[in-house]
Amino acid sequence: MQLLQDCLIILLAAWMCIDQNGLVVVSYFPVIVGFITGLIMGDITTAMYIAGTFELMQLGVANLGGSSMPNYGLATIIGAFLAIRTGTGVKTGIAVGLPVGMLAIQLDVLIKIINQFIQRRMERLNHEHNWKAMLRQPWYGVGLFGLETGIPTAILVFLGPTAVKEILKWLPAWFTNGLTIAGGLLPVVGVAMLLHYMPTKKFFTFLVIGFVLTAYLKVPILGLALIGFACAYYYFNSEMKKADEKQEVKAAGATNDQGDDYDE
């Protein structure tokens, strides 16, 4: 059973990176790979807790212009796998998964550099009219992207759980407590990064309402999401109504101007 789980986790990590770089561009989101990891490992709750944390961190960062960013999907898979397999807890899983996601930046840059040579080879084959060989080249790039996350995952899957358990046994209490505290702070960092790029001042009232509902009234996350959806829907309709009224005023003004010119 564990061997099957290990193989599925490695395949999931490889597919995630392939998908992110040219296919559906959906499965690399932490909440999606986290849910699938939870299904594979048999503990969706732990996996989704870790996935939600990394999703919040990813919302504040974007790899624009082909730039590289931490692979939070890989961090989710590794963190959830180690947390569930070793039973060390979600905060330790987050603290271990995050460095792996950061390391993936270097691997991503390396793979993109190699793919530049593949692209040049495709251009040369195109000029030579060797289109059959040219059409084979993109699959090499796809395979490289799969290896980008598949190999690190395989190393950690087959060596990580035992190694992590042994390391945690020898780590001092102050260090493990520090990991726990850091893991608890990560969601706050993600939310802060997200709010930095959002029109927080404009919607500060809704932010306060949401905080009061969840912190003081203990409204579940689903209820809070529904309230947020209702507020967004009301705001959207209000803005659309204002826009329609402005258009009607402009149209009426244009009609009056045309009438005045005709009378003259």
Image (tube, rainbow, N blue to C red):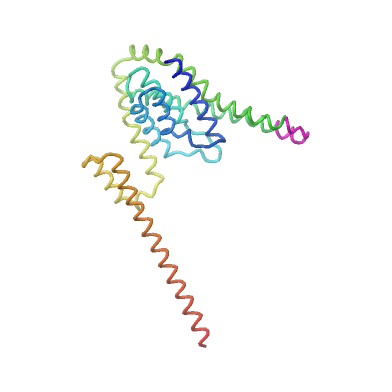
Most prominent secondary structure in the magenta stretch? helix
Q: Residue at x 42, y 65 (%)?
A: 244
Q: Quadrant of the N terminus?
A: top left
Q: How many marks?
A: 0
Is 128 magenta? The answer is: yes
Is 62 magenta? The answer is: no
**Residue 219, percent from left and from top:** 25, 41
**Residue 132, percent from left and from top:** 73, 31
**Residue 139, percent from left and from top:** 63, 29
Q: Quadrant of residue 75?
A: top left
Residue extending farthest to the right is: 128
Q: Residue at x 33, y 28 (%)?
A: 45
Please say if 163 is above or below 114: above
Q: Quadrant of residue 122?
A: top right
Please say if 247 is above or below 13: below
Q: Quadrant of residue 3?
A: top left
Which of 179 and 133 lies nearest the eye of the viewer? 133
Residue extending farthest to the bottom is: 264
Q: Residues in magenta?
A: 121-132
Please say if 219 is above or below 48: below
Please say if 129 is above or below 99: below
Position of 46 compared to 130: left or right?
left
Which of 95 and 128 lies nearest the eye of the viewer? 128
Q: Residue at x 63, y 30 (%)?
A: 115
Residue extending farthest to the left is: 216
Position of 113 compared to 95: left or right?
right
